[in-house]
Image (tube, grey):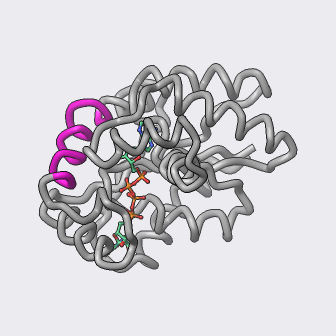
Amino acid sequence: MLNIVLFGPPGAGKGTQSQKLIARYNLVHLSTGDLLRAQIAQGTELGLKAKKLMDEGLLVPDEVVIGMIDSSLQANKTAGGFIFDGFPRTVPQAQSLDELLAKYDNGISCMVALEVAEEELVTRLLERGKTSGRPDDQDESKIRKRVTVYNTETAQVAGYYAAQNKFHALNGIGPIDSIFEQICELVDKHKP
Ligand code: B4P
């Protein structure tokens, strides 16, 4: 099975590149951001709690997102592989993901991190905020808060995968198709 973690700060291109990767490699896309926004749209209790945190640019508690990933893995037992987009965002999430995949005799094949400077992230997300309807994309101070949370709470997840020799970093600035081809070159080396 091919299981890819696509990593990077908010606005780095994870969602954008995930769409292209699922088409090329026939993977199931698991985006915790999308799963949380679906809960918000359905007006569930989980969604109401998550919305408050997401609108402030803060992370949703680990147990909530780990539970969502657990359910999604169970619902996709016959998948040929997964792309994890926006997950794991903390080291405990990364440890739980390894434990969950081990239940299916599986593991992460590689992590690809997209590196983009803060000013470019802010520009991209404010631009997306004009049409996305996402409250977390419409306020520059909230976007900068998300980048700070990434630097303080999420960036260390890279070290977790580096220790397993699965970490690869790429420049996330440039044409989307050219970044995609560079990701594919890395992924191809990890294909079973
Ligand atoms: P996410 O939904 O994961 O949101 P994101 O990081 O902002 O999106 P992404 O990085 O995928 O956007 P993309 O670059 O594709 O998370 C939202 C919130 O949910 C978090 O803040 C948190 O509160 C919560 N959450 C989610 N997962 C969680 C977890 N595991 N634990 C706890 N909390 C969690 O796109 C950005 C824009 O850039 C697009 O408009 C795109 O067109 C553009 N773009 C992309 N590539 C480009 C390029 N090469 N050049 C120019 N523009 C580009």
Report x, y in % for residue 150.
26, 40
- Looking at the image, residue 171 lies above or below residue 98: below
Q: Say which quarter of the image contains residue 103.
A: top right
What residue sits 49% from the left and 27% below the top? 94
Q: Say which quarter of the image contains residue 78.
A: top right
What residue sits 32% from the left and 63% below the top? 172
Report x, y in % for residue 72.
71, 40
What residue sits 81% from the left and 48% below the top? 79
Q: Quadrant of the N terminus?
A: top right
Residues shaded magenta: 142-155
Front residue of 143/91: it is 143
* Residue that protrudes farthest toward the right in the picture: 78
Front residue of 46/9: it is 46
What residue sits 71% from the left and 56% below the top? 27
Q: Is residue 164 left or right of residue 131?
A: right
- Looking at the image, residue 62 lies above or below residue 3: above
Report x, y in % for residue 165.
47, 32
Front residue of 135/103: it is 135
Q: What predominant SS class does the magenta segment belong to?
A: helix
Magenta span contains residue 153: yes
- Tell me the quadrant of ligand 1: bottom left
Report x, y in % for residue 40.
51, 50
| Number of numbered discs visible in the structure rendering | 0
Q: Is residue 105 left or right of residue 58?
A: right
Magenta span contains residue 102: no
Q: Is residue 12 left or right of residue 179?
A: left
